[in-house]
Amino acid sequence: MKVGFIQFSPILGKPTQTLERLEYLIDKGKHSDILVLPELCNSGYAFNSRQQALNSSESVADSKFIRFLHEKSNKYNLYIVSGFCEKSDKDLYNSSFLVGPNEYIEVYRKSHLFLNEKDFFSPGNTDYSVYDIGICKIGMLICFDWVFPEAWRILALKGADIICHPSNIVLPDLCQKTIPGHSICNRMFIVTANRIGTEDNLTFTGSSIICDPRGNILTQASDDQEEVMISDIDLNLARDKSITSRNHIFLDRRPDKYLDIAKAIEESV
């Protein structure tokens, strides 16, 4: 199968212009089975107030952005994962959603908020879920979730073949260096779709990346150019969890030794 990403710059607070830019970019990625877009793709990132974030948000049920991606999904018979500024009642969430043909949709809300995101968004209240789309099983994480190995491992244990990772990364190199390690430790494919450009005092680092379960970088974008890139992947690699003939990343686990991970944070700082 084929997986890909779109690396570009959403326009802060101007969703119509962002959709116009995405129109031809998704058309370029139409031969993918799964296409991943950046974090907060419908809104932009560097809000100057919670009101601006609210004005840039949409609810899942009546989102013009989601309807647009559903149309593209149906037209090209592909699945799309995108970041999304989500309004739900009085709360805002930094979310991602998976859309597919026939109005299929699933939503994940970001667990680990980064810097000023804490001023605008509520911490995510969704589980780490894996979605079986027939050809493969997909998990979703968002940007700063990359720091927390527990999230990746839970999705791996639930059977994810591919993690789709919409991002707005501003810390140079760190995430992109870490992604191959998460791929190796969990034996799964990862597609990190980062954005480019500058908003306020933030410069986004691009370098979107696709890694295989052996930590090989299949595709990596530049740090500042708009790009659509696609890789062929062999899902059998993600379903082979053996490191050697006598070592299996799940069967060799010792959960009885990991109980300390749940202790209060003050004990570990």
Image: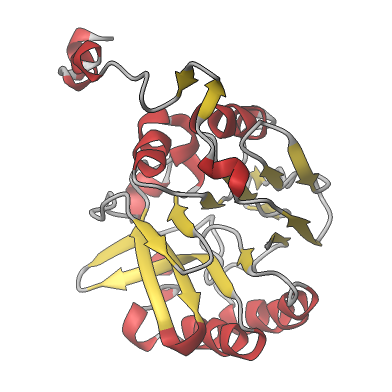
Position in image of residue 158 (x %, y %): 34, 46
Q: Which residue is drawn at 54% across and 19% down?
A: 245
Q: Residue furthest front?
A: 245
Q: Residue at x 45, y 73 (%)?
A: 56
Could you say which quadrant of the image residue 60 lies in? bottom left
Position in image of residue 66 (x %, y %): 48, 81
The quarter of the rendered structure image containing the C terminus is top left
Could you say which quadrant of the image residue 68 lies in? bottom right
Q: Which of 43 and 71 is in front in this view?
A: 71
The quarter of the rendered structure image containing the N terminus is bottom right
Position in image of residue 49 (x %, y %): 41, 59
Q: Which residue is drawn at 56% across and 64% down?
A: 44
Q: Which residue is drawn at 62% across and 85% down?
A: 72
Count of marks overlaid on the render: 0
Vertical relation: 243 (above or below) 133: above
Q: Which of 38 and 141 is in front in this view?
A: 141
On the question of residue 231 being in view, the answer is yes
Q: Which residue lies furthest to the left in this view?
A: 264
**Residue 228 relative to residue 106: left or right:** right
Q: Nearer the viewer, residue 248 or 220?
A: 248
Q: How is the image coloured?
A: secondary structure
Vertical relation: 219 (above or below) 64: above
Position in image of residue 54 (x %, y %): 36, 70
Could you say which quadrant of the image residue 78 lies in? bottom right
